[in-house]
Image: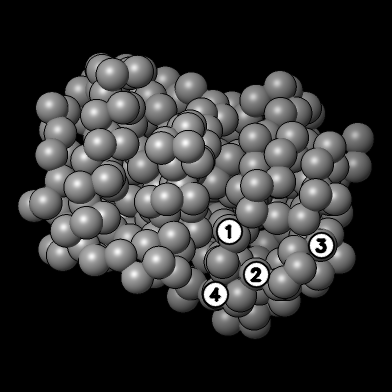
């Protein structure tokens, strides 16, 4: 087996939230808007390097995306050497099975069916574990952030380019839950209520919160969550809308901000590969 590949399983191995990992790993967060990377201390979930970020190319073809990934990693390495045994995890905006992208909601359709995990491993020259981007953010929040120590059903809503969702039961990830694409008033929910849709339609916070409260009620009817975590780039706007939302479940802001995807990816990369 090549040194830059890992054994395949249907889904990434996710360390339990309470599992204490040691060492460091590279976290790579490939999103619909930006591609970010940093080295993460797995014991604390803290970034030990500056976060490097570049815009996601348009169109987001394989060649263009891999060029930006390589550029981001080059910038990261320029700030300090990345040892060859330093493992990596990557978050990718798609349903992921066996390291392959099964959807391409925020990317180019050419990604569908591609072994992204292998492609990244070859480009980075080191083993990489791949996970859905919202799942990565959820893994980080459950291990280090707003969901730490939480039992029962936890739903993370990753409000970035779209509405990503990650679902946990007693700390165990249910992979690839795509609740941002449920029907909501005749369209997909994220087409009406994502941060991008809010800005594009110039919807005020009060009106947006009314619609999002209705969506939360829909999710609660489906899942009966004990805790709902609001994360992603929109979480920084929490003071503007947090008190306007209503929910039967406890509703909190994510603790790790826009670094959650990096941290969760790194945790999966290190813990999944070694454990």
The secondary element bearing badge 3 is classed as: loop
Real-space Cα distance between discs 2 and 1? 7 Å
Callout 2–callout 1 Cβ contact below 8 Å? yes
Residue at the location (64% across, 80% down)?
A: 75
**Mark 2 burial class by Cα count in 10 Å: few <14, some 14-19, many 20+:** many
Residue underneath mark 2: 56
* Of callouts 2 and 1, the N-terminal one: 1
- Residue 63 position, x and y percent, is 86, 65
Q: Nearer the viewer, residue 261 or 47?
A: 261
Q: Nearer the viewer, residue 256 or 15?
A: 256
Q: Is residue 194 above or below residue 189?
A: below
Rendered-image quadrant of the N terminus: top right
Residue at the location (54% across, 46% down)?
A: 133
Real-space Cα distance between discs 4 and 2? 13 Å
The secondary element bearing badge 2 is classed as: loop
Residue underneath mark 1: 31
Q: Is residue 104 above or below residue 84?
A: above
Q: Nearer the viewer, residue 21 or 241?
A: 241
Callout 1–callout 3 Cβ contact below 8 Å? no
Rendered-image quadrant of the C terminus: top right
The secondary element bearing badge 4 is classed as: strand
Q: In this image, 247 relative to 154: left or right?
A: left
Residue 261 in sight in this render: no
- Residue 49 position, x and y percent, is 47, 71
Q: State the residue lying farthest toward the right.
A: 1
Callout 4–callout 1 Cβ contact below 8 Å? no
């Amino acid at each position: 087996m090549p040194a830059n590949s890992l054994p395949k399983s249907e889904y990434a191995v996710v360390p339990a939230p309470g599992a204490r990992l040691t060492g460091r790993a590279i976290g790579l967060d490939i999103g619909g808007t930006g591609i970010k990377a940093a080295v993460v201390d797995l014991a604390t979930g803290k970034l030990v390097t500056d976060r490097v970020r570049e815009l996601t190319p348009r169109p987001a073809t394989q060649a263009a995306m891999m060029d930006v990934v390589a550029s981001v990693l080059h910038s990261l390495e320029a700030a300090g050497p990345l040892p060859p045994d330093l493992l990596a995890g990557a978050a990718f905006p798609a349903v992921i099975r066996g390291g392959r992208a099964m959807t391409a909601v925020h990317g180019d359709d050419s990604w569908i069916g591609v072994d992204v995990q292998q492609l990244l491993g070859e480009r980075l020259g080191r083993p990489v574990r791949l996970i859905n981007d919202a799942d990565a953010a959820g893994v980080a929040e459950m291990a280090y952030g707003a969901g730490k120590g939480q039992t029962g059903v936890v739903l993370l809503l990753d409000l970035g380019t779209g509405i990503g969702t990650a679902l946990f039961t007693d700390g165990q990830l249910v992979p690839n839950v795509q609740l941002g694409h449920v029907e909501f008033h005749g369209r997909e929910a994220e087409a009406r209520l994502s941060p991008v849709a809010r800005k594009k339609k110039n919807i005020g916070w009060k009106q947006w919160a009314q619609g999002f409260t209705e969506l939360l009620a829909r999710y609660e009817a489906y899942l009966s969550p004990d805790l709902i975590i609001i994360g992603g780039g929109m979480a920084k706007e929490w003071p503007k809308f947090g008190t306007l939302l209503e929910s039967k479940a406890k509703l909190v802001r994510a603790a790790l901000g826009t670094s959650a995807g990096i941290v969760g990816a790194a945790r999966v990369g290190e813990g999944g590969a070694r454990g």
